[in-house]
Structures are given as C-alpha cells and as structure tokens.
Image: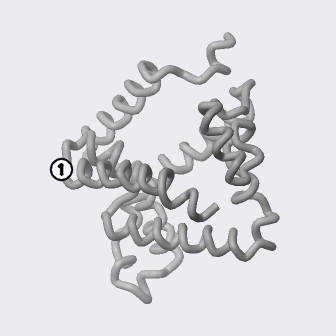
C-alpha cells in the first residue's frame, strides 16, 4: 500500500491525463484552468461592465467542477497521501537558489521568501508578485489560454496555436530562469 504515498511515474499519470482528455474531447469539451477565472467573473456580474464576460457561463459549469476536483485532489494528495513533502530538485540548483537567498530551496514546494505572509511587509516582494501576476494574466488572455489549456488540452486537440504557445512557454521559462531571475534576486 506504500505505492500510493510515492510519486507516480509518468507512465501511470500520463495515460491517466490522456484518458481524461480523451473523455473531454469525446464530449466536445475544451479544458483550461484560466477560463474558470472568466467564468467566475461572469458569475459575479462582470458582464454588466465588460463584453468579454458576457457569455453563457452556465455552459462552463463542468469546467468549474474539474477545477474544484483538481483543488480537492491536490489537497488530499498533499495532506493525506504523501509521506515525503520535500521537493526533489538537483543539489546544484538548491545551491544556486540558496546563493540567491532562497533558504527553503529543496525543503519546501513554495519558497517562503515569496509565498509567506511576511512578503506583505516587503515592497520588493509585493512588486515582484504584482508585476508577475499582471504579466501572467495578460499573457493568458493574450494567448487565449494558460499553460494547462494549451499544453494539455490544446496539444491533445492537435492545435498549432497551442504548440506555438507551449514552445513560447518553454523559451520564456528558460530565459526567465537563466537570465532574468538572477537579476531580480
């Protein structure tokens, strides 16, 4: 029974994701996490102010259920089905992150230097998080989807725009980690 507490290998989790995507495609659904933000804004009445949010949000209830399931599943997996909460990253990367001031690198999933309540007392952290959130929101809207929408859903639908977007995500990630990240921290 210990297998359930270990990370599942790619040949288990990958086909499971593919099976879910197959079911969604068979039912004519296109999955994406960021589209739930649009749905939530529409539910809250943003359609009264902006045309973008004026759509039949009830047709997207299934996507909210998927997102809720992902959140609940992540919570259960993290709190009840994991016996090792340490993130396994390369020791060289841990050393480099420690040099940049991330003391929890290799010990926790989210660096407390960015995701702890203490960041609200640090102007630099607030600025980094605000600009990052703005860029992610803009990029998601501009690309008509987020990483999960393009990489999982779009690629499984064989959409060329999703392939281009995923290539851009990887290039952007490499540029960020190797060139911009050391300048910021």
Asked whether, in this view, residue 108 is left or right of residue 11, the answer is right
Residue at left 66%, top 34%?
A: 87
Q: In the shown orientation, is residue 168 left or right of residue 110?
A: left
Quadrant for residue 145, please give it: bottom left
Any part of residue 174 in sight: yes
Q: From what the image shows, is residue 102 above or below residue 13?
A: below
* Scheme of image coloration: one colour
Q: Position of residue 155 (x, y in %)?
A: 26, 43
Depth order, front residue of 37/162: 162
Give the residue pinned by disc 1. 160
Mark 1 burial class by Cα count in 10 Å: few <14, some 14-19, many 20+ = few
Q: Residue at x 48, y 51 (%)?
A: 178
Q: Position of residue 75 (x, y in %)?
A: 67, 41
Q: In which quadrant is the N terminus drawn?
A: top right
Q: Quadrant of residue 61?
A: bottom left
From this viewpoint, is residue 64 visible?
no
């Amino acid at each position: 029974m210990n297998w359930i507490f270990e990370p599942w290998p790619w040949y288990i989790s990958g086909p499971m994701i593919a099976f879910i995507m197959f079911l969604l495609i068979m039912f004519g659904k296109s999955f994406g996490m960021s589209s739930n933000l649009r749905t939530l804004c529409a539910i809250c009445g943003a359609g009264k102010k902006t045309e973008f949010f004026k759509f039949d949000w009830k047709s997207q209830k299934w996507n909210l259920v998927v997102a809720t399931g992902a959140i609940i599943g992540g919570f259960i997996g993290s709190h009840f089905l994991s016996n090792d909460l340490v993130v396994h990253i390369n020791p060289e990367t841990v050393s480099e992150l420690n040099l940049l001031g991330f003391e929890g690198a290799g010990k926790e999933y989210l660096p407390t230097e960015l995701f702890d309540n203490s960041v609200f007392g640090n102007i630099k952290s607030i600025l980094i998080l605000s600009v990052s959130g703005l860029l992610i929101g803009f990029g998601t809207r501009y690309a008509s989807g987020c990483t999960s929408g393009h990489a999982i859903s779009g690629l499984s639908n064989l959409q060329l725009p999703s392939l281009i977007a995923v290539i851009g995500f990887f290039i952007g990630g490499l540029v960020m980690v190797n060139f911009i990240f050391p300048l910021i921290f």
